[in-house]
Amino acid sequence: MSNPIGENPDHDWHDAHATFYGDISGGETMQGACGYGELFQQGYGLQTTALSTTLFNNGLSCGACFQIMCVHDPQWCIPNAGTIKVTATNFCPPNWAEGGWCNPPNDHFDLSMPMFTKIAQYKAGIIPVKYRRVSCYKRGGVKFELNGNPYWITALVYNVGGVGDVTAVIIKGSNSGWLQMSRNWGQVLQTGGSLVGQSLSFQVTTSDDKTIECDNVAPGNWQFRQTYEGRVNF
């Protein structure tokens, strides 16, 4: 039974399987379906995973943190390896032709190779695991990478603590009211309207219905393709 997205981090372990993608450098894990970019610069590093269709939940699970351990496979599980903790940063698409581990309704983690090899031998290919949602611990405030043009703006919301997965964002310019942002893809949200030349504030809500307000995150002279950090986090 999977841990429903939106549920608080819990103590129950759930059954799944895990594979890995990319090589030991983790280059192939950068970018991805959550909208994140250079994962080292953004603080996620190689402690990441792609999620199967069921767990990915159309991108709503991006930013969620999971604790995972290899189980029931003495041939490939590394003895006394303990657990790893990873953040969801990508999507493992269904493959109807072969294997199909990421197909619905499977709970499946496609880990970075460095994370996979902490709990199992890389020759295993695929391993049975147990997992649970856990809290994310981030340094500093929630961050907002701004893109768009004078007529609409997108914000990649990252470095989110607590449950980690963002469900809603509203934005306010210094000369405007609060505007609801809609999900573009992954953890990238967007809104129309001209906010250029206004300082920007955000309210961010995560899947446990907690909300924080980041006031005046970006100054009036903010620029597209820049990242601005709030003073608070979950």
Image (cartoon, helix red, strand yellow):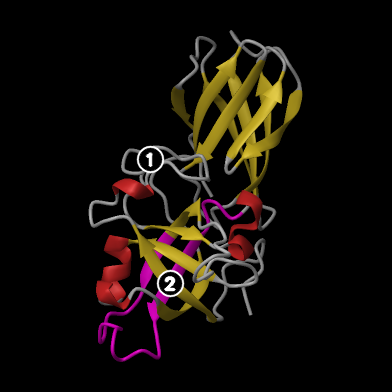
Determine which of the numbered discs, if any, sits on residue 68 in the image. Answer: none
Report the residue at 32% width, 49% height from top.
45
Residue 116 percent coordinates (x, y): 32, 68
Is 12 colored magenta in this rendering?
no
Segment colored magenta: 61-86
Q: Nearer the viewer, mark 1 or mark 2?
A: 2
Q: Amino acid at mark 1?
A: Gln
Residue 155: which quarter of the image?
Answer: top right
Q: In the drawing, does residue 43 fall left or right of residue 153?
A: left
- x and y percentages locating residue 62 in the rendered image: 55, 51
Tag 2: amino acid: Ala
- Decide whether the magenta segment is chiefly helix, strand or loop: loop
- Please tell me whether residue 103 is drawn above or below residue 226 in the rendered image: below
Residue at the disc numbered 1: 42
Image point (35%, 75%), residue name: 83
> Residues under labels 1 and 2: Cα distance?
24 Å
Could you classify mark 2 by the number of other residues whose Cα lies within 10 Å: few (under 14), some (14-19), or many (20 or more)? many
Task: Say whether disc 1 or disc 2 marks the residue closer to the N-terminus.
Answer: 2
Residue at the image point whose x is 65% and y is 52% from the top: 58
Q: Nearer the viewer, residue 181 or 186?
A: 186
62 above or below 103? Answer: above
Name the mark on residue 18: 2
Does residue 44 appear in the picture of this structure?
A: no
- The secondary structure type at the circle numbered 2 is strand
User: In this rendering, does residue 165 appear at all?
Assistant: yes
Asked if residue 201 lies left or right of residue 122, the reply is: right
